[in-house]
């Protein structure tokens, strides 16, 4: 499979679609997942064009993983989560739904099951507040 730049994350990276941005640099965009599995579910989207981990440039991976770690720490601290799940999917049979490399940071709370992937849209005001708080904690 080849990379298709018309995917939703490609459009967000080009400024064609809005996002609740947490952080952005030359390497990646960090944004809130609008269909979160838990409060504070954040996405790290590398700017380099790749479909997923399988075709990504190793230099891109090396540059983005420290950011994934920083976001995981910040999201856990801001939300008061008991743990953090970091997920990354490769191709549809593995659960990938947007074919642009991205990492999920999903805060986990004791006794609270994760919601379904894309189970329901979050409140925009809450996402804006979380984005601001996570950005401040980075």
Image: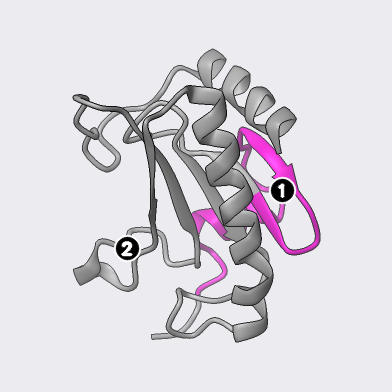
Residue 88, position as x, y percentages in the image: 39, 62
Residue 80, position as x, y percentages in the image: 46, 23
Kindly identify the residue that appears in the image at 50 percent across and 78 percent down.
3
* Residue position marked by numbered label 2 in the rendering: 96
Kindly identify the residue that appears in the image at 61 percent across and 33 percent down.
20
Q: The residue tagged with tag 2: helix, strand or loop?
A: loop
Kindly identify the residue that appears in the image at 69 percent across and 31 percent down.
137
57 vs 49: above or below: below
**Cα distance in 3D space between marks 1 and 2:** 22 Å
- State which region is magenta: 4-29
Out of 81 and 113, give the one closest to the viewer: 81
* Residue position marked by numbered label 1 in the rendering: 15
| 14 in magenta | yes
| 66 in magenta | no
Query: Is 115 on the left or on the right of 73, as rendered?
Result: left
Query: Is 116 on the left or on the right of 137, as rendered?
Result: left
């Amino acid at each position: 499979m080849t990379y298709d730049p018309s995917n939703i994350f490609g459009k967000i990276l080009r400024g064609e679609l809005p996002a609740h941005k947490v952080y952005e640099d030359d390497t990646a965009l960090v944004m809130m997942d609008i269909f979160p599995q838990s409060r504070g579910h954040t996405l790290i989207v590398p700017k380099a064009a790749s479909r997923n981990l399988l075709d990504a440039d190793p230099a891109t991976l090396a540059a983005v993983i420290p950011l994934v770690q920083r976001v995981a720490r910040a999201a856990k601290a801001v939300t008061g989560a008991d743990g953090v799940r970091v997920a990354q999917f490769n191709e549809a049979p593995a659960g990938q739904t947007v074919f642009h490399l991205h990492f999920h940071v999903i805060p986990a709370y004791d006794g609270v099951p994760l919601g379904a992937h894309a189970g329901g849209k979050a409140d925009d005001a809450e996402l804006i507040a979380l984005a601001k708080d996570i950005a401040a904690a980075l």
